[in-house]
Amino acid sequence: MNGPDARVALPGPGRARLWQQRVTPGSARSCTSLLSREERLRAAAMTDAARARFTVARGVLRGVLGSGLGLRPDRVPLRVTCTRCGASDHGPVRLELPGVGLALSLAHSDELAAVTVAHGERGVGVDVEAGTSIGDLGTLARRVFAPADRDRWQTLPAARARPTVLAAWACGEAYAKATGLGLGTALAGVGARLDGVGRLVVAGPRELDGWSVRTVPARLSGYAAAVATRHEVRLSGGDFEHTGTECANGGAAALSGQATAHGG
């Protein structure tokens, strides 16, 4: 965007866009003004770190939608409802604007937040994972890999083992968000495995009933990111700019799938 009157281009038919933003005290402060009153009250009750992540993720989402739709960011009509328990303090975020069909997903981990917007209402999921905050790698590997692939994963050098299991986990999380499946079911469905040279492979659209799960370059080193969309949807990176704020300086690197999809 160039100048205060430029608008973010929201995705058209068959498209989805990803934005990533580093979470810093500065970006959190500048994104605060983009939040709704209810979101600011909710953020006030959080710890400093949780507040920063929440504020940046919601701020980028509201900034993108507000710019693309010509609305004040804090007045973009968003609703959060848990599909399992009906609570309004967690769950997927939806745009409630008649005549506008957009699927939304957001994620944050440690110092990185990500937002994905897809045309239509068939669902989209994004996840980011920080390599410094995942705990025991072996425990994680037992959840994402079958025994044979876990044994193969254990032979990888440390420099590859950590990002590989992070990426596998992110793929499962993104698929769960897009489809509404429980995480255990989603991880099993993604079917993460390693090929003969130790590269991550995930299930393709034929196994996932038309869903495509792909890893994407994370904006920060040591992080993993993944997006799940319908197979026919083309994903691209976007940059978000809100004039005069650090929150504006986010952006996604050019996207290229890192996990191979098998079976189509």
Image: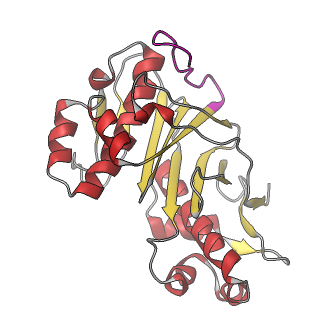
The answer to whether residue 82 is visible is no
**Residue 77 position in % (x across, y down):** 30, 25
Closer-to-camera residue (85/66): 66
Q: What colouring method underlies this structural image?
A: secondary structure
Question: What residue occupies the far right of the structure in this picture?
Answer: 196
Question: What residue occupies the far top of the structure in this picture?
Answer: 5
Could you tell me which quadrant the C terminus lies in?
bottom right
Magenta span dominant secondary structure? loop
Q: Is residue 95 above or below residue 164?
A: above
Q: Which residues, given as a range, are shown in magenta?
A: 1-15
Q: Residue at x 44, y 79 (%)?
A: 135
The answer to whether residue 203 is visible is yes
**Residue 26 position in % (x across, y down):** 35, 41
Which quarter of the picture shows residue 33?
Answer: top left
Q: Is 168 included in the stretch rendered in magenta?
A: no
Residue 143 lies left or right of residue 146; in this view the side is left
Residue 5 lies left or right of residue 213; in this view the side is left
Q: Residue at x 51, y 30 (%)?
A: 240
**Residue 38 position in % (x across, y down):** 17, 35
Q: Is residue 94 above or below residue 114?
A: above
